[in-house]
Image (cartoon, grey):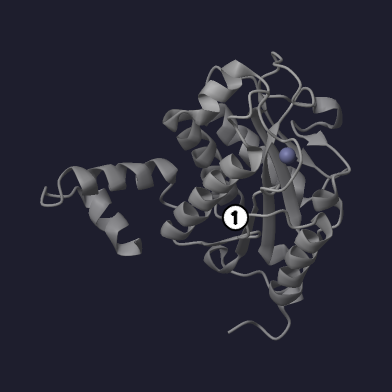
Amino acid sequence: MLNLNPMTLNMKPQQKKILIDNGHGCNTAGKRSPDGRFREYAWTREIARAVVADINDLGYDAQLLVPEEYDVSLSARCYRVNCRCDEYGKRNVLCISIHVNAAGHGDRWYNATGWCAYTCKGQTTSDKLADCLYRQAGLWLPGHRLRTDYSDGDPDQEAEFTILRKTSCTCVLTENGFQDCEESLRFLESEAGKEAIIGLHVDGILDFIDPNRPYGYKDLQKHRRSKSANDCQIQTQTEQEFDKIL
Ligand SMILES: [Zn+2]
């Protein structure tokens, strides 16, 4: 049951609504690699679905903002977020929009690489979420460039993107590598690359809403590996505890 006045209530981390937006749709023009093999909408859907499933497996409440394959307009996406804010109270909702960057317009290959996150202008809770994501990006993406802008004292970049401006809760947009850079694409298309991008989102979000939680994405991976490797193997105490929340 929701509190009668959700706007003033600070819910438990497990009750907060985590909305994952997978950006563009299958009918969005452009937004692909110059050779056409990589489509931003498809990759971000794969990542967003995994982030939602993994956060839910860790005991929190995540949901896809756009389960559709086709493009849902930015105003409709903001409306969906803001409906959740009305329902839960805006401090109990957060939204992350997952994208892949491009240096050009899909006409040729470029050399730009790196990961970054955007927030709206000014200091808000979105900057705190972006800090958590940058910290995890540093851990999950060793050797990769983190694109930062410290001119206002924090690492995130600021932009007037609609999803950041027109949503009333904490909201961050991530640009995960470049779809018109061959080196960047090789990483994004690899299993290790996908795991790293999923991991930084899962752990970054959970660092923000529940910094003292006992488990993170690596524990979930370890748990799954041990489950599939040998189901009758004697479990460690950590795994037994972990089993209780799954
Ligand atoms: Zn995009």
Q: Is residue 143 above or below residue 176?
A: above
**Residue at x 29% of width, y 47% of height:** 223
Q: Nearer the viewer, residue 209 or 74?
A: 74
Q: Is residue 153 above or below residue 86?
A: above
**Residue at x 60% of width, y 65% of height:** 16
Is any atom of residue 245 visible in this view?
A: yes
Badge 1: residue crowd in 10 Å (few <14, some 14–19, many ≥20): many
**Regarding ligand 1, which quadrant of the image does it lie in?**
top right
Q: Specify whether 87 is left or right of 229.
A: right
Quarter containing the C terminus: bottom left
Q: Nearer the viewer, residue 42 or 209?
A: 42
Q: Residue 8 location, x and y as percent?
A: 75, 74
- Read off the residue under disc 1: 209
Q: Specify whether 178 is left or right of 153.
A: left
Q: Is residue 237 above or below residue 93?
A: above
Q: Specify whether 75 is left or right of 221.
A: right
Query: In what element is the residue under mark 1?
Result: helix
Name which residue type carries label 1.
Answer: Ile
